Image (cartoon, helix red, strand yellow):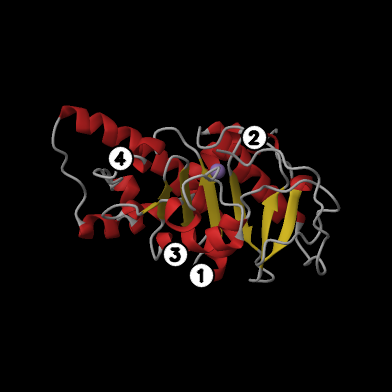
Amino acid sequence: MSTSASKPASVADVGTPTPTDRALLEEIAIANRILFDQGVVDAFGHVSLRHPGNPQRFLLARNMAPGQVTADDILEFDIDSNPVNAAGRGMYLERFIHAEIYRLRPDVNSVVHSHSQSVVPFSVVPTVKLRAICHMCGFLGMGAPNFDIRTCAGDATSLLVTSREVGRHLAEALGDQSVVLMRGHGSTVVAPTLRLAVYRAVYTEINAKLQMDAMKLGPVVFLSEGEAAAGAQTEGQVDRPWNLWKARVSQP
Ligand code: MN
């Protein structure tokens, strides 16, 4: 279950790179390293940003461990997941996750895909939903949908999202939610900004841990629909955790 090593791209670059501020590439690199430092991604997983200068493009690291990403490793892709400036550098096999969500969700500008460990159990037990259990996690609402790749690709896949078609089914399963689980694989988290996507990915993992602990004690009182919706107020504080997390990863 991974974006494991692909050979250097046999896919040729398409189109012309969009002018991109160096500071933006640095910010995406920091997001990669925060997600590793916070235990959301390991050697696998990725975070992307819809290009602010062209909504039909997105920025995503080349095929490498997120904890080692620097600004020079960020590539540009078109909405069909073709590279724009890879120049032969390897690409994540699962980049289709990002493109197909950007295609279906104009409100989404950043996507995190991970295999974070506490979330995976919720993807394989259909009778239990991952649901907002505390005030920092209202974005989970009344429960994250769960995407089962068997519904669109049969029961003998690697479970990886390696095509536009499977990516589209994943995006459809996400619907209008912020998090979609992926059976036996992980999850994908979306947000209107890069910082908020990182925040939600970190707190999705925390919610999963807390929910499993609480379920050992007894029946759980989850956030109500109204309480979950009110969690948007907490998300207005996103720069506070971002600055704290960023300070820990200033060097790759
Ligand atoms: Mn994956």
The local crowd at label 1, few if under 14, some if 14 to 19, many if 20 or more residues have their Cα within 10 Å, is some
The tag earlier along the polypeptide, 4 or 1, is 1
Whether residues under marks 2 and 3 lie with C-beta atoms below 8 angstroms apart, the answer is no
Q: How far apart are marks 1 and 3 (CA)?
A: 8 Å
Residue name at image x 34 percent, y 52 percent: 144
Residue 93 in percent (x, y) is at 66, 48
- Mark 3 sits on what residue? 172
Residue 167 horizontal side relative to residue 210, left or right: right
Residue 104 - label: 1
Residue 20 in percent (x, y) is at 76, 62
The tag earlier along the polypeptide, 2 or 1, is 2
Q: How far apart are marks 2 and 3 (CA)?
A: 30 Å
The tag earlier along the polypeptide, 1 or 3, is 1
Q: Judge depth for marks 2 and 3 and give the one in front.
A: 3
- Name which residue type carries label 3: Glu
The local crowd at label 3, few if under 14, some if 14 to 19, many if 20 or more residues have their Cα within 10 Å, is some
The tag earlier along the polypeptide, 2 or 4, is 2
- Mark 2 sits on what residue? 67
Dot 4: element: loop
Instruction: Report the front residue among 73 and 95.
Output: 95
Q: Distance between the residues labelled 2 and 4?
A: 30 Å
Residue 154 in percent (x, y) is at 48, 52
Whether residues under marks 1 and 3 lie with C-beta atoms below 8 angstroms apart, the answer is yes
- Mark 4 sits on what residue? 125
Residue name at image x 81 percent, y 58 percent: 85
Relative height, residue 51 to residue 220 (above, below): below
